Image (cartoon, helix red, strand yellow):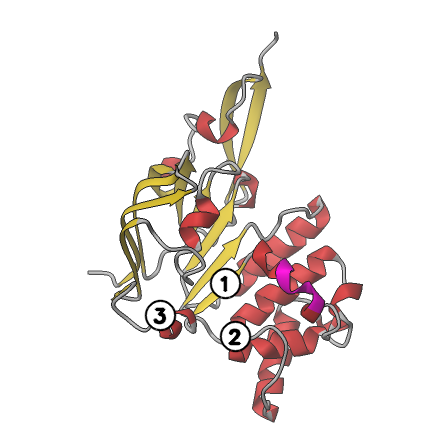
Amino acid sequence: MREEIIGFDEITFRRDGKKILKGVNWTVHQGENWALLGLNGSGKSTLLGMIPAYTYPSSGEVRVFGHTYGKYEWQKVKARVGFVSSTMNEFSQTLNYQTVQRIVLSGKFSSIGLYDEVTEEDRFKADKIIEDFGINRIRESKYHLCSQGEQRRSLIARAFMNEPDLMVLDEPCSGLDLSAREELLKTLNDNYKKSHAPLIYVTHNIEEIIPAITHVAIMEDGQILRKGKKEEVLKDEIRSISRTNVVKGVAVEWQYGRAWIKVSWDKG
C-alpha cells in the first residue's frame, strides 16, 4: 500500500459564524502530484493552510506524514514542507533588500531572511538550485528589483533548498503575464522530473496544470466535488469552476500533456 502523505478527514472550518469548509475528505499518497482547482473563495487556501498550521480545523482530523495534528510536535512536520503562497507578501520588507542568493539560502533554515551561518556546501547547493530555476543572472540582485516572475521563481527555489518531503504552491502564477507564467511553469515542470517530493499546486486556472501533475481535486463552496487522475476529472462536465451566468458551455481539450479550456458564451 502506498504511503499516505496527507489525510484530511471530515474537515470543517468556521470563521465569524460562517462555515468555510464543509466536511472535506482528501488523501494524497507518495508518488502523486495534485492540483487543487477551484474559484476564488472556494476554500482552497484555507484547507491547505492547515498543513503548516496557518489555520486550524474546527472539526475533523488532519494528518501529514502519518502524524495527526494536535498529537505531535507540528514544528517537525512544518520543517519537512516547502510552502509558497501569497501570504509571503507579508514579509516583503525583509525580502526586498535580500539578494536572491541569500533568499534561496534561507530556505535551509525555513526562515525569512538569513540569520544563521552557511557552509560552502550550502552555497554550492543554493547556486545549483538557482541555476536549475533559471535565475542565475539575478543571483546578486535585490529581491525588490526583480520582476514578479523572477520573485516567484526565487521563492520556489528557496522552498527546494531544504529538500522538502512535500511541496505546496498556492497560486504561484497569480498576477503573472502569459510569458512569465509559462516560463515559471516550464521551470517547475522540469524540476519536478527530478524531485521525489509530492506536489500540491493550488490554482483556479486549468491551463496551469503542468504534465508533472498526476491528479486533480475540484473544490467548490468548501467541499471537494471531484477528485482523481487528471484525465478522468478534467472533462467537459466542469462548469462549476467557471461559474457564471454568461458561460453557456465548457469544453476541455488536451494538447502537449496539458488541458486547455474552451468557453462558449450565452448569446443573451
Residue span colored magenta: 89-93
Q: Amino acid at mark 3?
A: Trp
The question of residue 183 being in magenta is answered with no
Q: Is residue 137 visible?
A: yes
Judging depth in this view, the residue of 53 and 24 nearest the camera is 53
Q: Looking at the rendered structure, which numbered label has been put on residue 110? A: 2
Q: Residue furthest top?
A: 268
The Cα atoms of the two marked residues, 1 and 3, are separated by 15 Å
Mark 1 or 3: in front is 3
Q: Looking at the rendered structure, which numbered label has been put on residue 74? A: 3
Residue for point 52% across, 28% down: 242
Q: Earlier in the sequence, mark 2 or mark 3?
A: 3
Q: Looking at the rendered structure, which numbered label has been put on residue 144? A: none
Residue 220's quadrant in the figure? Answer: top left
Q: Earlier in the sequence, mark 2 or mark 1?
A: 1
Residue 257 position, x and y percent, is 50, 45
Residue for point 49% across, 49% down: 202
Q: Relative to residue 2, is residue 141 depicted above or below?
A: below
Judging depth in this view, the residue of 145 and 130 nearest the camera is 145
Residue for point 47% across, 74% down: 163
Whether tag 2 and tag 3 are in contact, CB under 8 A, the answer is no
Residue ID for mark 1: 83
Q: Amino acid at mark 2?
A: Ser
Is label 1 in a helix, a strand or a loop? Answer: strand
